[in-house]
Image: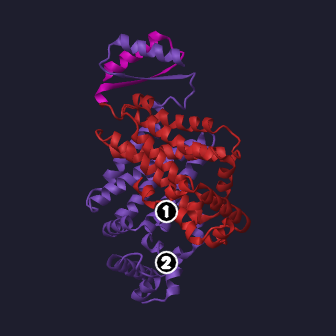
Chain colours: A purple, B red
Amino acid sequence: MSEAQGQGWEAGGSAKPSKREALIAAAFDLFTKHGFEQTTVDDIARLAGVGRSSFFRYFPSKEDVVFPDHEGCLAEMTAFLQDGSGEEDPVIRVCDAARLVMRMYSGNPSFAVQRYRLTKSVPGLRHHELSVVWRYERTLADYLRRRFAHRPDGTLRADVIAASVVAAHNNALRAWLRSGGQDDPTAHMDHALRFVLNSWGPEGEARSADDQDADDVVVLIAKRKAPMWRVVRGIEATLGDL
Amino acid sequence: MSEAQGQGWEAGGSAKPSKREALIAAAFDLFTKHGFEQTTVDDIARLAGVGRSSFFRYFPSKEDVVFPDHEGCLAEMTAFLQDGSGEEDPVIRVCDAARLVMRMYSGNPSFAVQRYRLTKSVPGLRHHELSVVWRYERTLADYLRRRFAHRPDGTLRADVIAASVVAAHNNALRAWLRSGGQDDPTAHMDHALRFVLNSWGPEGEARSADDQDADDVVVLIAKRKAPMWRVVRGIEATLGDL
């Protein structure tokens, strides 16, 4: 988050929200009418009734005006992760942190849908979005690395789970955006995150043998209708393999 | 991979490898001595003894000369995924596809380590690398989406697994790069991918109940040293409860 804080324009944005909002509205108006590449920062500033230097007080680049809420959301996510007692299940915690991003999008559906269409059609914006997504993923992974610091493969586990959560979030977000922002965003998120939690959350942990002392625990999954002799043979085979 | 083929400079590269290689060598020489931002395409072309337009025949941008092998590797990955019989386990297949990327890096350790240091210190290159990584992830996800097309949540499953594989690959790659390219890259990859396969591979599938009819499956966790009669009694009690 040092990157976010270092840019400094977020503070300016909250001090004078109306100017900032005028710039965002002007930018989207021009991007939609004339295209992203064809619109200059001067065009945006002129339509918003401010000077060019004012634009750069609020946004580091033309790309950033398309993603005006991400700095705030990244800061909120970081604070949320820091505020934990340390007793929470870490995977549930990062899933809840990812929900903050979905909430930011779904708080303004028409803007989110408009931006989705714009971003899909402008490669430069897609690249910019990748770097934003990467910062969310790093924020989640850094939190998980701290929580998993005592575990073997803590870094690997942290990186893979953070990537899974971000992929699930993006899947849910796209599904919601494709509904034109009409669907229930929470339902999409619950569904996608449940998929991750099934593998990496507290229940997935209990099911997965990879983490547990191989000497200590056997996990067997069998068809309920399997005859007992088949279940016993499965257990014997598994014990034999360990 | 239409994007890769569409750029066209890869074919030029293979027709005149020596000129292309001279440009790469000149670029890294100048980037290392004077910095990435301070070096122009003209500087690179001059040192390589070619014209500016020759540079752009081989590379779309200054950033691309830092990642000269990715287009070829993406094409190789796509071909590898297409060449399957369709009978392979899809998760094992994408893990093997990710190994191609590691093999590209480890085929030239000193270049890989040099690039790693350069990329870490230049934000523009990090962003460019993110877009390259994203294309690998999309290639893996597209393959998995096809393979999982018949499954409920096939797209979600494909996206999450592709992200997991890429995160595991990147974790292994970084570990290997931090060893200065001295460690065994295959050992790092095996280790990282095993972590993914434990959850999503054929064995993880068997362990995870999320896909199967909840009515259909029994999960039993028992101490390994438990006597068999106790295990059987546990199963009977569990089945009785259902």
B42 with respect to B206 (left or right) = right
Q: Name the mark on residue A220.
A: none
Q: Is residue A200 above or below residue A82?
A: above
- The answer to whether residue B115 is magenta is no
Query: Which amino acid lies under the numbered mark 2 shown in the image of this protein?
Result: Gly
Q: Is residue B152 above or below residue B115?
A: above
**Residue A184 screen position, x and y as percent:** 28, 56
Circle 1 packing at 10 Å, graded few (<14), some (14-19), many (20+), is: some
**Residue B107 screen position, x and y as percent:** 63, 44
* First along the sequence among labels 2 and 1: 2
Q: Is residue B195 above or below residue B20?
A: above
The answer to whether residue B59 shows anywhere in this view is no
The answer to whether residue A98 shows anywhere in this view is yes
Query: Which range is magenta?
Result: B214-242
Residue in front for this viewpoint, A201 or B103: B103
Q: Which residue is drawn at the image coordinates 31% and 60% (left, top)?
A: A177
Q: Which residue is drawn at the image coordinates 51% and 62% (left, top)?
A: A131
The mark total stands at 2
Q: Where does the N terminus of chain A fall, quadrant-wise?
A: bottom right
Q: Which residue is mark 1?
A: A132
What chain does badge 2 belong to? A
- Image marks 2 and 1: residues in contact by CB distance under 8 Å: no
**Residue B156 screen position, x and y as percent:** 36, 46
Residue most extreme to the right: B33
What chain does badge 1 belong to? A
Residue in front for this viewpoint, A22 or A95: A22
Q: Which residue is drawn at the image coordinates 41% and 55% (left, top)?
A: A99
Residue most extreme to the front: B15
Disc 2/disc 1 C-alpha distance (Å): 18 Å
Q: Which residue is mark 2?
A: A13
